[in-house]
Structures are given as C-alpha cells and as structure tokens.
Amino acid sequence: MNRPLINKAVDEAALVSKLQAGDRFAFDSLLELYQDRIFNFVRRMVNDPLDAEDIAQEVFIRAYTNIHRFDNRAGFSTWLYKIASNLCIDHVRRRSRRPDVFSLTRDQFEEESQQHDVADERFDPEQALLENEMASVISHAVVCLSPKLKQVLLLHDTENMSYEEIAQVVQCPLGTIKSRLFLARTELQKAVRAYLSGGEK
C-alpha cells in the first residue's frame, strides 16, 4: 500500500529537479498530476468555474516562473496549494462586495439526476430529495464561510491535508489551524440545525 506513495514522491521530486534544471517537459508532467486537484480546490474557494479556470492557470504560471524559489523544505503539492490559496483569498477579497449565491453541488446534483433514466425500485425519491437538500444546505454554508475558514476546511476535509501541511500552506501556527477548522465546522453545524428546525436561526 505504501510503495506507490513512495514512488510517487520520488517521481515528483525528480520532476521538480528536472524542471529546475530547465526541462520543460517535466512541467507538463507536474501539470498533469495536479491540474485537476488545484482547479477543484480553487473552484470551491471562489465559487465560480470561469474565475477558477483563470486562477488555476495563474497558479501554474507562477509555479513555473518561480520554480527556482522552491527549496524542497515543503512538498511541491504544499507549495502549489500555498500559491493557490493566496490567489484565491486575494480574489475573494476583491469581490467581497458582490453577493455570491453559487452552490458547489447544485450542478453536480443536476448531472446525477439526469443519469436516472432507468427506474430503480430501491430509489426513494423523498429520501433523495432530503439528501440533496441537506447537501445543498451544507454547500451554501461552505460558500458563506469567510475565506480563511473555508480555506482550512477545504484543505483538511477535501484535500485530506494534515494540520502540519495546512500550517505550511496558510503559514499559521497549528493552534490557529485547529481553531479555524473548529469554527468552520461550527458554522456548518449551525446551518444544519437551522435547516432541521425549519429555517429558524
């Protein structure tokens, strides 16, 4: 189980070394490894697919042009997420005066619902509706989080980063990371409780 992870780390380090030595093909390989993950993270941070495409592209442009500054003290992926996080927070701050009602999962649910062409006796429409509504509530609650809380929540719960890795990305003490994660989850719990109680806050 561990061997592929070790090989991946070795391959990644080799690709970074080649890129730092001027091998442009190494960058294409790194891009292939991380472009989907970075785009998905950015999209959840900024809640707009078009903006996410631009920001994700900028992440890799900056990584490519600043690869000589990468010193291997943190993993390459951690460095990428640090660049992505900074760009996302800057973007959100610039647009903070504009209301944002984009739901992370609404489009996903529409796509999934279109796949139910064949009736399934086990499919419970009422249960599916409740699950979709709950997911939409949580999604909206994530959208409404402050950038710093959303950043830590996504890095931990979606990108599966450890506290230590998140601290490297965010450049904050571990205590701050744990506190922000706690606050983010508290906000989600409030949203769920409000939904379950009929919308009362």
Image: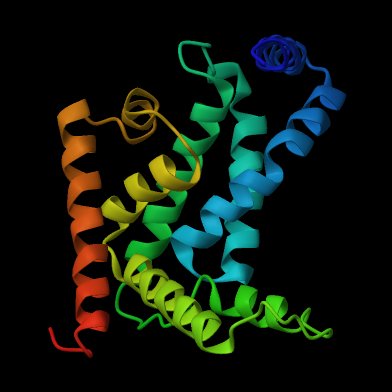
For residue 173, say whether it is visible.
no
Residue visible at 37% across and 77% down in the picture: 137
Indicate left or right for 137 with 184 as reference.
right
Image location (x, y in percent) of residue 197:
19, 85
Residue at 36% x, 26% y is 168
| Quarter of the view holding residue 89 | bottom left
Q: Residue furthest left?
A: 201
Q: Answer whether residue 171 is visible to the viewer in this image.
A: yes
From the top left corner, tell me how far across and down residue 3 is, in percent: 70, 10
Decide which of 136, 27 is in the foreground and name it: 136
Quarter the C terminus occupies: bottom left
Say which of 175 and 108 sits in front: 108
Q: Is residue 97 above or below residue 41?
A: below
160 over 16 or under it: above or below = below
The answer to whether 159 appears left or right of 108 in the picture is left
Q: Quadrant of the N terminus?
A: top right
